[in-house]
Amino acid sequence: MAVEVRIPTILRQYTGGAKTVEGTGDTLAALIDDLETRHPGLRDRLVENGSLRRFVNVYVNDEDVRFLGAEKATLSDGDCVTVLPAVAGGAPAAR
Amino acid sequence: MLTIRRDLVDAIVEHARKDHPDEACGVIAGPAGSDRPERFIPMLNAARSPTFYEFDSMDLLRLYREMDDNDEEPVVIYHSHTATEAYPSRTDIAYANEPGAHYVLVSTRDDDTHEFRSFRIVDGEVTEEEVQVIDGE
């Protein structure tokens, strides 16, 4: 089962410049593991200690995966996954 | 160097003033590869905070889809600091993920004057750049 994954500019260094790549997996975590075998380094940018990084947004068919179980979100053949880094920041007093 | 139209500078400052004391944020999109900011897109600060900004995740998805469809990219990514100088904070640097963008910061800490500065943020390195304001639409 194949899933199309849209890769943001900042992460295309891991995909040889490709804007979309294909992967397989019945959960988001499995998909990321599969992508890592062909695009080493990518997983680390998406996942930290087994959880999706706070400032990386992942969407399955245009739904934020945070509402679909995050890295445990289930995937089906033909799904489209989009990765977008958050646009965020703040003043020095933040954190 | 950032070259930007005066009306776009005014639009950013106006947005920053309007949302003060919360941080305001947004994008100016332009044709991919042109380095020309053209389409002003104010965004909602989902954090609604005086010390933090974040685009709402669904707004972010729509924005990038739209830019993709129009063959645009985020030429300028702007936000305001409402009590401190217009210089990227550690947080700004940590979350800067568009090495091709001009990161514009506006400070609204003074009522009658504002700072308007532009930076490149690449791999955690901040470089300030000149801002050239041009007339005309």
Image (tube, coloured by chain):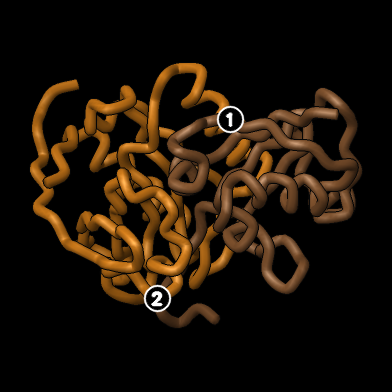
Chain colours: A brown, B orange
The label shown at residue A9 is none
Q: Which residue is mark 2?
A: B90
Q: Residues within 10 Å of mark 2 (few under 14, many from 20)?
A: some
- Residue at 37% of width from left, 47% of height from top? B77
Residue A19 in view, yes or no: yes
Does residue B74 appear left or right of residue A37 in this picture? left
- Residue at 79% of width from left, 28% of height from top? A2
Residue B110 horizontal/vertical position (percent): 27, 70
Q: Is residue A34 above or below residue B65?
A: below
- Identify which amino acid the numbered label 1 is placed on: Thr
Residue A84 horizontal/vertical position (percent): 58, 45
Q: Which residue is mark 1?
A: A20
Does residue B44 appear left or right of residue A28 in this picture? left
> Which of the two residues, A3 or B32, is positioned nearer the viewer here?
A3
Quadrant of residue A72 within the rendered picture: bottom right
- Identify which amino acid the numbered label 2 is placed on: Arg
Q: Is residue A46 above or below residue A92?
A: above
Quadrant of residue B109 within the rendered picture: bottom left
User: Do marks 2 and 1 share a subunit?
Assistant: no
Q: Is there CB contact under 8 Å for labels 2 and 1?
A: no
Residue B47 in view, yes or no: no
Q: Is residue A73 above or below residue A90?
A: above
Q: Residues within 10 Å of mark 1 (few under 14, many from 20)?
A: some
Q: Distance between the Cα atoms at labels 2 and 1?
A: 31 Å
Quadrant of residue B59 within the rendered picture: top right
- Residue at 44% of width from left, 36% of height from top? A17
Residue A62 horizontal/vertical position (percent): 74, 32
Q: Secondary structure at mark 1?
A: strand
Q: Closer to the camera: disc 2 or disc 1?
A: 1
Q: Quarter of the image containing the C terminus of chain B?
A: top left
